[in-house]
Image (cartoon, grey):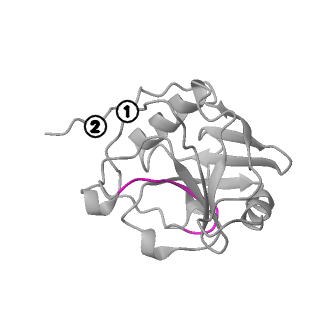
Amino acid sequence: MNYLNYLNQENPLVTMNVKGFGTIQIELFYEIAPNTVSNFINLIEMKYFDGLKFHRIIPGFMIQGGGGERNICAIKGEFKINGFQNPLEHSRGVISMARTNDPNSQTSQFFIMHANSPHLDGSYAAFGGVTQGIEVVDKIAAVPKDYKDSPYEDVIIESVTIDKHGKSYPAPVCYQAK
């Protein structure tokens, strides 16, 4: 389902300031991926993302950031191939969690869709959508990069804040391998 159907002024609102590019605002959809949203909120409140980079940029696909040095607990992926019903489509403007081949390896890396990518639906935890600043995503997607899709010049996330509209959200549940 298209993320515009989930927009609600009571959803948590993320403000991401990207140095030299502008501000991206993103609504998070707790009802779609509750543990993923709780994890993202927790990381924002820890100021985890402040100073990190968009380190992987593929125009016509996505921009990826959130990779840091600190150990962050892994969470279970909230998507179909992992037994979780997540109807959110990976359309332009959607934010989703990156992972390794292990479906329960989501930590802090996220990506924002630059273009519709339906091949990701059901395999990655989409959990929100851009409400303002899609032109900032476009500017980031256009930066020169190397053969590994890394920008030649750092694209730095200066700060990320959250407005929870007075609501509280639980701490994320870390994945425990059985």
Q: Amino acid at mark 2?
A: Tyr
Q: Quadrant of residue 177?
A: top left
Is the Cβ of the residue at disc 1 closer than 8 Å to that at disc 2?
A: yes
**Is residue 96 shown in magenta?**
yes
**Is residue 101 shown in magenta?**
no
Which residue is located at x 61 percent, y 24 percent?
Answer: 166
Magenta stretch: give its range: 91-100
Q: Say the numbered circle drawn on residue 21.
A: none
Q: Secondary structure at mark 2?
A: loop
Residues at marks 1 and 2, CA–CA distance in whole angstroms: 7 Å
Q: Is residue 145 left or right of residue 86?
A: right
- Direction right: furthest residue: 20
Q: Nearer the viewer, residue 177 or 113?
A: 177
Q: Is residue 112 left or right of residue 17?
A: left
The image shows residue 10 at horizontal and vertical percentages of 61, 39
Which residue is located at x 42 percent, y 47 percent?
Answer: 33
The image shows residue 8 at horizontal and vertical percentages of 62, 48
Q: Nearer the viewer, residue 100 or 78?
A: 100
What secondary structure predominates along the stretch shown in magenta?
A: loop
Q: Quadrant of residue 80?
A: bottom left
The image shows residue 149 at horizontal and vertical percentages of 62, 65
Q: Say the numbered circle drawn on residue 175.
A: 2
100 shown above or below 116: above
Q: Residues within 10 Å of mark 1 (few under 14, many from 20)?
A: some
Write down the residue under mark 1.
Answer: 73
Q: Amino acid at mark 1?
A: Cys
